[in-house]
């Protein structure tokens, strides 16, 4: 789901080769959520997306989208 979000697609387009790390269940802003991390395979760029488990609403986005 995170990869299909606009932020995830942009990260993939900018970095080309990426990997998705294991998702983790967390609690964010008081609701059950899924923490997803994507990393560039050719640099140190990463993207963290936190998505509400029930509504799939994006609760937070953090990272860099530039090749490094």
Image (spheres, rainbow, N blue to C red):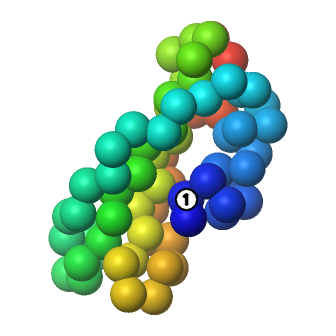
Asked whether 31 or 21 is in front, the reply is 21
Q: Residue furthest bottom?
A: 55
Q: Tell me what residue is drawn at x 56 percent, y 65 percent.
A: 1
Q: Is residue 63 visible?
A: no
> Which quadrant of the structure image shows residue 10?
top right
23 relative position to 55: left or right: left
Q: Tell me what residue is drawn at x 19 percent, y 70 percent.
A: 27
Q: Position of residue 61 (x, y in %)?
A: 50, 54
Quadrant for the C terminus in the image: top right
Q: Tell me what residue is drawn at x 43 percent, y 69 percent.
A: 51
Which residue is under mark 1? Answer: 2
> Which quadrant of the structure image shows residue 35?
bottom left
Q: Tell me what residue is drawn at x 50 percent, y 71 percent.
A: 58
| Mark 1 burial class by Cα count in 10 Å: few <14, some 14-19, many 20+ | many
Q: Is residue 38 visible?
A: yes
The secondary structure type at the circle numbered 1 is helix
37 relative position to 17: left or right: left
Q: Position of residue 66 (x, y in %)?
A: 68, 25
Q: Position of residue 50 (x, y in %)?
A: 40, 61
**What is the tally of numbered marks visible in this picture?**
1
- Vertical comparison of 14 with 52: above or below: above
20 relative position to 66: left or right: left
Q: Position of residue 13 (x, y in %)?
A: 80, 37
- Vertical comparison of 43 with 24: above or below: above
């Amino acid at each position: 789901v995170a990869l299909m979000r606009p932020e995830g697609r942009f990260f993939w387009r900018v970095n080309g080769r990426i990997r998705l790390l294991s998702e983790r269940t967390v609690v964010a802003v008081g609701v059950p959520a899924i923490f997803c991390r994507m990393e560039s395979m050719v640099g140190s760029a990463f993207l963290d997306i936190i998505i509400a488990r029930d509504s799939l609403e994006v609760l937070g986005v953090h990272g860099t989208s530039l090749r490094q």
